[in-house]
Image: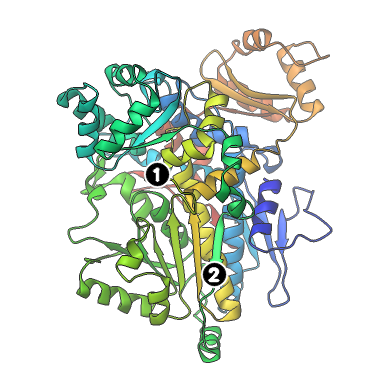
């Protein structure tokens, strides 16, 4: 996590002192210092001190927060993603809270300490799935391995190429499948499973669909897909991604910041703008958000958790995703999990009256955030150039898909996983033929978008000028794989079956392995064989092994497989709240 945090800080222009990071877990994890600020100390916390902060690791937090469970729905079993996902996610969220505290200081507040819960960050990443598992009606009980891992996307052609299909419309989808001999009714069944993969992390398609594609060469599939209006994206390796011309442009940073021109008078006016100090660092900041699906709405949700007032723009009649089951009080719980803190303004952005309303809102706001399709902002005259004329100090943020990559496909989570090499890395670790149907990049991309906005707000506060910031799902994928290149040494690290349930064990020090060997009556001279380790662990269930191992200083936790049980686990009570469904509270606090 320190490696990831240092890399992200460098990408934002933050310099690390020669003294390096704190090494004592009782001290601050890091400190932000600047002549214009009181120093800000950042500490990681563990809920109810259940697992010591020093024992938190990628494996253990993935296991206990439910990520392994959600990933396992389509990959065949509860298992790690195989990439340092939570290190990247938690580092970004720690930096975001720290920069927000700096913004809060410059706006008149006294924010000098930030506490970050890595487990809270992990729970937030699966928040929409937790909502679905705790809804009052049509509750989703989707356990790892509940569907056939061979029937999920991606697909494989006759010449051995793995690839993703993508379309956001059922018409092209049906047309494509009919062109290769799949009947309309069966294509409809496949569409329903395909459409829900973003929401449910499973996509069991009819076997006939996979078999039909397996009989065709990839070039023929591409041709038929192009005729039907469906995109194809091959599953590539990280090495292939590094050969792309745009990779060098994005290698140093997942963000692209640019400054509009501003007169000295405008800069001075922005510098003098203050807000009454609140209990959260972004209190008084106003955000206008026009986003769909997960990436953009999550970015807005994080800004709201930090105290910003977020005005969400929705089309007349409301966002159609509000009706996606399961629902509570007439609204999709998955949708509500990312949007319940926002104010909603219905507007037809294509009409002159709608654009005038947006101009009025932006004129009184600090941030405009959108994730529209490429070119749409310019077409509507709602791009940065136009809105900076309305509000010179505006942070104009675009949360996109492909960045500068010349890919002719919708920039969605699974297409970007495929192109970036993330799908291949996860597949290799998981023993599957594709990445995760957990929305890995939508979530990380949303976190990075909100971090970019917060960094831009800090720059505005200091320099008094507007900022344009762009981030992308592809930038998130590149960051994730770069972080994965530096893996910590381990003596025993993995997920193992017990008498009942799975347990994740992470021994990073020789002393931990010695303690484990003594507890399980294993040979102390070397790492135990998998067969012997399994035989010893079969003596007790996972929830009994966990406290025994933790009490001996061994990093261990039972793998959460049922998200419904996570919601009622007393150890996580401070991370969750409950109304009609369970939702994740802010992973940050500002004592």
Disc 2 is placed on an element classified as strand
For mark 1, what is the residue? Answer: 412
Visible in this render: residue 133?
no
Location of the C terminus (image quadrant)? bottom right
Q: Residue 115: image x %, image y %?
A: 61, 56
- Pointer 1: residues within 10 angstroms few (<14), some, or many (20+)? many
Q: Residue at x 74, y 62 (%)?
A: 15
Q: Residue at x 26, y 73 (%)?
A: 355
Q: Nearer the viewer, residue 141 or 358?
A: 358
For mark 2, what is the residue? Answer: 258
Report the side of 299 relative to 12 (left or right): left
Report the side of 510 relative to 73 (left or right): right
Q: Residue 19: image x %, image y %?
A: 84, 58
Residue 48, compared with residue 565, is above or below; it is below
Location of the N terminus (image quadrant)? top right
- Pointer 2: residues within 10 angstroms few (<14), some, or many (20+)? few
Distance from disc 2 to disc 1, alpha carbons, whole Å, reads 25 Å
Q: Nearer the viewer, residue 561 or 381?
A: 381
Q: Residue 427: image x %, image y %?
A: 52, 26
């Amino acid at each position: 996590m320190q490696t990831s945090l240092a890399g992200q800080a460098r990408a934002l222009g933050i310099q690390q002192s020669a003294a390096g990071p704190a090494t004592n877990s009782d001290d601050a994890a890091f400190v932000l210092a600047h002549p214009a600020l009181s120093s800000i100390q950042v500490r990681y916390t563990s809920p109810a001190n259940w697992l010591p902060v020093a024992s938190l690791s990628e494996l253990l937090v993935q296991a206990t927060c439910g990520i392994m469970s959600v990933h396992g729905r389509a990959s065949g079993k509860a298992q790690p993603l195989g990439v340092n996902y939570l290190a990247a996610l938690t580092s970004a969220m720690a930096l975001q809270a720290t920069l927000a505290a700096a913004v809060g200081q410059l706006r008149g507040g006294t924010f000098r300490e930030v506490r970050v819960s890595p487990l809270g960050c992990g729970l937030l990443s699966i928040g929409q799935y937790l909502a679905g598992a705790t809804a009052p009606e049509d509750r989703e009980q989707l356990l790892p391995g509940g569907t056939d891992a061979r029937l999920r996307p991606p697909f494989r052609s006759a010449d051995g190429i793995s690839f993703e299909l993508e379309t956001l419309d059922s018409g092209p989808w049906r047309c494509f499948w009919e062109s290769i001999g799949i009947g309309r009714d069966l294509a409809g069944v496949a569409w329903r499973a395909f459409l829900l993969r973003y929401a449910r992390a499973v996509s069991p398609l009819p076997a006939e669909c996979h078999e039909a594609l397996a009989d065709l060469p990839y070039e023929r599939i591409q041709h038929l897909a192009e005729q039907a209006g469906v995109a194809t994206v091959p599953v590539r390796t990280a090495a292939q991604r590094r050969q792309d011309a745009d990779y060098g442009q994005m290698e140093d940073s997942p963000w692209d910041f640019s400054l509009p021109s501003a007169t000295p008078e405008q800069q001075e006016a922005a510098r003098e703008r203050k807000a009454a100090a609140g209990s959260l660092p972004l209190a008084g900041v106003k955000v206008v958000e026009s986003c769909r699906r997960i990436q953009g709405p999550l970015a807005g949700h994080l800004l709201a958790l930090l105290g910003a007032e977020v005005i969400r723009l929705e089309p007349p009649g409301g966002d159609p995703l509000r009706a996606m089951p399961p629902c509570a009080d007439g609204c999709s719980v998955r949708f509500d999990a990312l949007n319940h803190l926002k104010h909603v303004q219905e507007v037809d952005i294509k009409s002159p009256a709608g654009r005038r309303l947006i101009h009025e809102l932006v004129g009184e706001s600090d941030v405009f955030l959108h994730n529209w399709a490429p070119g749409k902002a310019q077409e509507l005259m709602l791009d940065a150039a136009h809105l900076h004329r309305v509000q010179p100090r505006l942070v104009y943020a675009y949360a996109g898909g492909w960045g500068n990559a010349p890919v002719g496909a919708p920039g969605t989570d699974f297409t970007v996983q495929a192109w970036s090499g993330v799908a291949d890395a996860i597949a290799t670790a998981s023993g599957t033929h594709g990445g995760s149907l957990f929305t890995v990049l939508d979530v990380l991309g949303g976190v990075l978008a909100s971090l970019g906005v917060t960094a831009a707000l800090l720059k505005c506060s200091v320099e008094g000028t507007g900022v344009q910031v762009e981030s992308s799902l592809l930038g998130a994928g590149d960051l994730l794989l770069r972080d994965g290149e530096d893996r910590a040494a381990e003596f025993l690290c993995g997920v193992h079956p017990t008498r009942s349930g799975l347990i994740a064990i992470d021994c990073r020090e020789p002393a931990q392995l010695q303690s484990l060997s003594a507890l399980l009556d294993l040979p102390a001279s070397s790492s135990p064989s998998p067969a012997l380790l399994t035989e010893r662990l079969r003596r007790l269930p996972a929830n009994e092994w966990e406290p025994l191992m933790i009490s001996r200083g061994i990093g261990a936790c039972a793998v959460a497989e049922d998200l419904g049980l996570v919601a009622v686990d007393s150890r996580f009570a401070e991370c969750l709240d409950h109304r009609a469904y369970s939702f994740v509270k802010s992973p940050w606090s500002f004592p």
